[in-house]
Image (tube, rainbow, N blue to C red):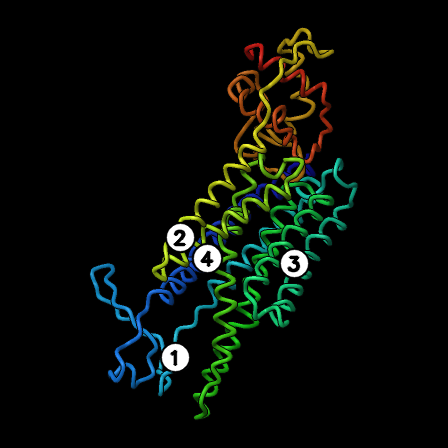
């Protein structure tokens, strides 16, 4: 009893830690992405001052007038740097750092602390927890290394080719991970890899480049514009990475994507759609409206949705063991395969509360959640998570037959 209580308290404490860190991740992510979107918009909307004007003489390359929150704003961008360094200078960095720190913490709390349940699918690969964690961490390191070397190579100056190569690399990583980890873990590690690239850009290129500009001014030297150009390139890359990362952040709620046999290809289509839509807005900020990009993005999303749509359910009453789809048999399967997680007090290690609040430990709750159970366990076969409890196809068929007969 004491061991059970200790395990329960640990699971409950972990659940609260998950909540707080996830909340922090969301807040800091909004701050980082909001700043990224704003500055890309600002860069695309500033207008050069009139030749010979005071602003032009000061070295201002562009300015913008805006009204917001009851006040007028006049941001100005210098071609390299102002003639004198201001006393106060705001650095946009901690939004990025804390987004990554909180996201990496979530990887440990949700996935690494419970790798056997959240990362391993025995039908995909029979791994140990440490092997799965090693693959996950290795993905982050390999992803940043490949991306950074590519940026520094001659191809780094050819944005079009670099974008194509990076897309191919990300899809290849998704494919490889789908052959080693559960679909859900594969998706989240692709997102974590892209997020690591993004924060690596801030930590290793953008902020150091800005520091060199400031240090040159403090030393009375003329700043080298190359540092600003490199930082700008990485900042634009981060802007295009944003929509794919945001989708992956919420993908764990949509088993229809990561549980698909070709989940890596599904992810490729959604990432491509996000990049196309982001490109449309970036062009529009420059005064160029090309509806081909969002149209292609929407068509891609519709194609993915149609391609992964589950086939119309086939009546399962003829399946052996399901000729009489009575509730007693269905409840016996649920008791054996489902309620270790989906009950008021889960017995599955790592779970302090039923996932998504769906509980199945009483007849009333089973009937109440019948449609969701049918969708997740019979149609999508996404539950149990990584088939932890080894539910069989015949047992899924039994649940399907019972539901199709009216779930009485």
Return the mark for residue 79.
Answer: 1
Proximity of marks 1 and 4: CB atoms separated by less than 8 Å? no
* Residue with the mark numbered 3: 140
Q: Residue at x 64, y 37 (%)?
A: 5
Residue 291 rendering spot, x and y as whole percentages: 40, 49
Residue at 54%, 49% in the rendered image:
272
* Side (left or right) of 37 relative to 249: left
In the displayed image of the protein, which residue is found farthest to the left?
70
Q: Quick one: label 2 or label 3, which is nearer the N terminus?
A: 3
Q: Separation of disc 4 and disc 3 at Cα?
A: 20 Å
Q: CA distance from mark 2 to mark 1?
A: 29 Å
For residue 28, the mark is: 4
Q: Are marks 2 and 3 in contact (CB under 8 Å)?
A: no
Q: Residues within 10 Å of mark 1 (few under 14, many from 20)?
A: some
What residue is shown with label 2? Answer: 290
Occupied quadrant, residue 148: bottom right
- Image spot of residue 117 (x, y percent): 68, 39
Identify the element where label 4 is drawn. helix
Q: Nearer the viewer, residue 343 or 54?
A: 54
Judging from the image, what secondary structure is the residue with disc 3 in? Answer: helix
Image quarter of the N terminus: top right
Q: Are marks 2 and 4 in contact (CB under 8 Å)?
A: no
In whole angstroms, how far apart are the C-alphas of marks 1 and 4?
A: 30 Å
Q: Nearer the viewer, mark 2 or mark 4?
A: 2
């Amino acid at each position: 009893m004491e061991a059970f209580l200790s395990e329960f308290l640990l699971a409950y404490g972990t659940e609260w830690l998950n909540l707080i860190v996830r909340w922090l991740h969301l807040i800091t992510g909004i701050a980082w992405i909001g700043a990224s979107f704003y500055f890309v918009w600002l860069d695309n909307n500033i207008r050069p001052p009139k030749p010979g004007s005071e602003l032009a003489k000061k070295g201002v390359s562009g300015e913008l007038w805006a009204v917001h929150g009851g006040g007028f704003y006049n941001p100005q961008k210098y071609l390299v740097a102002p003639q004198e360094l201001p006393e106060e200078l705001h650095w946009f960095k901690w939004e990025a750092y804390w987004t990554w720190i909180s996201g990496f913490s979530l990887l440990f709390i949700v996935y690494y602390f419970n790798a056997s349940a959240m990362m391993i699918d025995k039908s995909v690969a029979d791994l140990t927890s440490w092997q799965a964690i090693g693959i996950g961490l290795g993905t982050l390191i390999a992803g940043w290394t490949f991306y950074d070397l590519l940026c520094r190579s001659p191809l780094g100056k050819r944005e079009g080719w670099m974008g194509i190569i990076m897309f191919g690399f990300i899809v290849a990583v998704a494919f490889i991970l789908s052959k080693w980890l559960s679909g859900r873990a594969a998706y989240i590690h692709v997102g974590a890899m892209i997020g690591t690239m993004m924060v690596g850009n801030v930590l290793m290129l953008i902020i150091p480049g800005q520091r060199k500009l400031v240090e040159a001014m403090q030393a009375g030297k003329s700043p080298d514009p190359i540092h600003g150009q490199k930082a700008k390139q990485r900042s634009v890359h981060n802007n295009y990475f944003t929509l794919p990362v945001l989708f992956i952040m919420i993908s764990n709620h949509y088993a229809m994507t990561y549980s698909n046999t070709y989940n890596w290809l599904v992810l490729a289509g959604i990432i491509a759609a996000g990049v196309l839509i982001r490109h449309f807005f970036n062009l529009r900020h420059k005064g160029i409206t090309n509806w081909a990009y969002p149209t292609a993005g929407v068509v891609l999303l519709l194609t993915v949705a149609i391609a992964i749509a589950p086939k119309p359910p086939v009546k399962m009453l003829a399946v052996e063991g399901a000729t009489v789809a009575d509730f007693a048999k269905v409840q016996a399967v649920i008791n054996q395969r489902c309620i270790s997680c989906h009950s008021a007090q889960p017995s599955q290690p790592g779970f302090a509360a039923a996932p998504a609040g769906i509980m199945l430990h009483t007849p009333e709750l089973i009937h109440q959640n019948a449609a969701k159970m049918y969708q997740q366990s019979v149609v999508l076969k996404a539950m149990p998570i990584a088939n932890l409890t080894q539910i069989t196809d015949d047992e899924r068929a039994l649940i399907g037959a019972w539901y199709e007969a009216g779930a009485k």
